[in-house]
Image: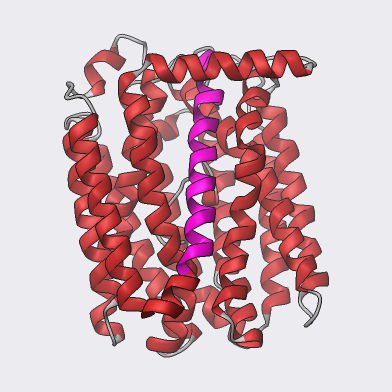
């Protein structure tokens, strides 16, 4: 699992992402919990998640063009600095009646993330190759996300109660500065390119080329709707997770433990991913993990006590993360590096649209049908995604054999993953 850490540039990317992830997980409970405690509104709380994913819907299509046209290293540095400034601006939006500032800052922070994510996804294969070292890199990203969720979830809940949300905002802003510094220390080599100005015609042409690249790969084309459906269901439950924990499980401290168990599941996913990504068929692995995730959704949101909820949270963390990483790795291996940013951006856009729809619909459905009702709907939708994956993703041999011929671990031209860039379940 630790093979990718032998590469210096990946160590820096991974280390910067680790620090940034820690800052984000300290804050991830604080903002929705603060809004819910002050307003008591599921709608206003769900809008915090909606604000996070609106930029992906607006900027997602062109983010890949910039990723493939600009220097990815500089883009990652600049967007990390932008996110630090945006998070710091949240301090001005904590007072009642000024939540529009908070929502605007969330939009700005995540606009930077929309540009950062495809650059990170495309740059990773250019650093570690597309063979078994790429499986190591993506497993390590899952390990980092799970570790920070395991620590940051409960710690964020405790610090929110004793220190207040302002301290957590400052910590998150500093973590983005650390991520920018780590990216600045990486090599300029590895297929990076000088920035090229783009006209509207250039952007349109690049987008068309990215669509053609997506359509040329049957597996990638099939994975996009499966991913979108899964993330829509996940977002509908993510939007009500904090209120569920506060109301049903005993407050922010217990909600922090719930997030911690989700993180423990993500940790368990890392060795499983390392063992299975290069051995199991994408079709079979994705169908199995989506099925397990759908069942775990229902078990979690029908729980009435913390001891019953925690095992389901572990299962969601494990199988939900695998359901996100398996398509990501398949895309990184199947798509040429020159257009990987644009194809990755298509997935980012789909994620944003699905998550935005789920984040808006989830709280309203929860108020109308109560939490068990929305849990049943989300579970059935996830099981539908599993059936779609089994039906549409072509059976194929594991990608390791094909990728081995591509000189794994060697710098190549062309191409989540820091904190929330690696999409994880119920966050």
**Residue in the picture at 21% in, 24% down:** 394
Give the dominant element type of the magenta stretch: helix, strand or loop: helix
Front position in the image: 95 or 143: 95
Q: Is residue 414 visible?
A: no
- Residue found at the far top of this picture: 405
Say which residue appears at 66% left-offset and 86% top-offset. 38
Residue pushed farthest bottom? 250
Q: Nearer the viewer, residue 374 or 2?
A: 374
Up-down: is 187 above or below 242?
above
Q: Is residue 253 left or right of residue 309?
A: right
Name the quadrant of the N terminus.
Answer: top left
The foreground one among 411 and 285 is 285
Whole-percent x, y for residue 384 in the image? 24, 49
Left or right of 293: which side holds 58? right
The percent position of residue 332, horizontal first and vertical second, equals 41, 25
Q: Is residue 397 above or below residue 109?
A: above
The residue that appears at 55% across and 29% down in the rendered structure is: 9
Residue 226 place in picture, x, y as percent: 33, 40
* Left or right placement of residue 311 versus residue 166 in this view: left
In the image, residue 262 lies in the stretch drawn in magenta: no
Magenta-span inclusion, residue 342: yes
Q: Image quarter for residue 215?
A: top left
* Residue 112 visible in this rendered orientation of the protein: yes
**Magenta part of the protein: which range?**
337-362
What residue is drawn where x is 36% and y is 31%?
A: 329
Quadrant of the image occupied by residue 199: top right
- Above or below, 322 against 156 in this view is above
**Count of residue discs:** 0
Image check: 259 left or right of 102?
A: left
Q: Position of residue 375 (x, y in %)?
A: 31, 69
């Amino acid at each position: 699992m630790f093979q990718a850490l032998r590469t210096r540039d990946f160590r820096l990317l991974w280390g910067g992402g680790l620090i940034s992830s820690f800052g984000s997980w300290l804050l991830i409970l604080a903002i929705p919990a603060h809004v819910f405690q002050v307003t008591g509104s599921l709608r206003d709380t769900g809008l915090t998640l909606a604000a996070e994913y609106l930029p992906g819907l607006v900027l997602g299509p062109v983010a890949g063009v910039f990723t493939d046209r600009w220097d990815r290293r500089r883009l990652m540095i600049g967007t990390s600095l932008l996110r630090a400034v945006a998070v710091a601006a949240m301090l001005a939006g904590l007072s009642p009646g000024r939540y529009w500032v908070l929502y605007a800052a969330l939009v700005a922070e995540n606009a930077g993330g929309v540009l950062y994510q495809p650059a990170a996804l495309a740059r990773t294969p250019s650093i570690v190759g597309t063979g078994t070292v790429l499986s190591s890199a993506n497993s390590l990203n899952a390990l980092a996300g799970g570790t920070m969720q395991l620590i940051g979830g409960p710690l964020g809940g405790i610090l929110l109660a004793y220190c207040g949300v302002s301290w957590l905002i400052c910590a998150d802003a500093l973590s983005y500065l650390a991520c920018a510094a780590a990216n600045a220390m990486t090599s300029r080599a590895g297929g990076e390119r000088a920035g090229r100005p783009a006209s509207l015609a250039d952007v349109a042409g690049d987008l068309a080329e990215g669509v053609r690249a997506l359509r040329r790969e049957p597996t990638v084309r099939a994975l996009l709707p499966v991913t979108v459906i899964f993330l829509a269901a996940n977002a509908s439950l993510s939007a009500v997770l904090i209120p569920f924990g506060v109301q049903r499980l005993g407050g922010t401290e217990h909600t922090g433990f719930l997030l911690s168990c989700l993180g423990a599941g993500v940790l368990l996913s890392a060795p499983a991913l390392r063992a299975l990504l290069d051995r199991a068929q994408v079709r079979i692995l994705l169908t199995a993990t989506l099925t397990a995730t759908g069942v775990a959704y229902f078990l979690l949101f029908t729980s009435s006590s913390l001891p019953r909820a925690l095992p389901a949270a572990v299962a969601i963390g494990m199988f939900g993360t695998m359901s996100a990483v398996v398509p990501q790795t398949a895309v990184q291996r199947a798509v040429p590096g020159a257009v990987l940013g644009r194809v990755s951006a298509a997935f980012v856009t789909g994620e944003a649209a699905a998550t935005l729809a789920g984040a808006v619909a989830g709280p309203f459905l929860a108020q109308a049908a109560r939490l068990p009702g929305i849990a049943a709907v989300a579970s059935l939708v996830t099981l539908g995604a599993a059936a779609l994956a089994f039906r549409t993703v072509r059976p194929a041999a594991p990608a390791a054999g094909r990728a081995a011929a591509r000189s794994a671990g060697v710098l190549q031209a062309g191409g989540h993953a820091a904190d929330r860039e690696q999409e994880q379940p119920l966050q």
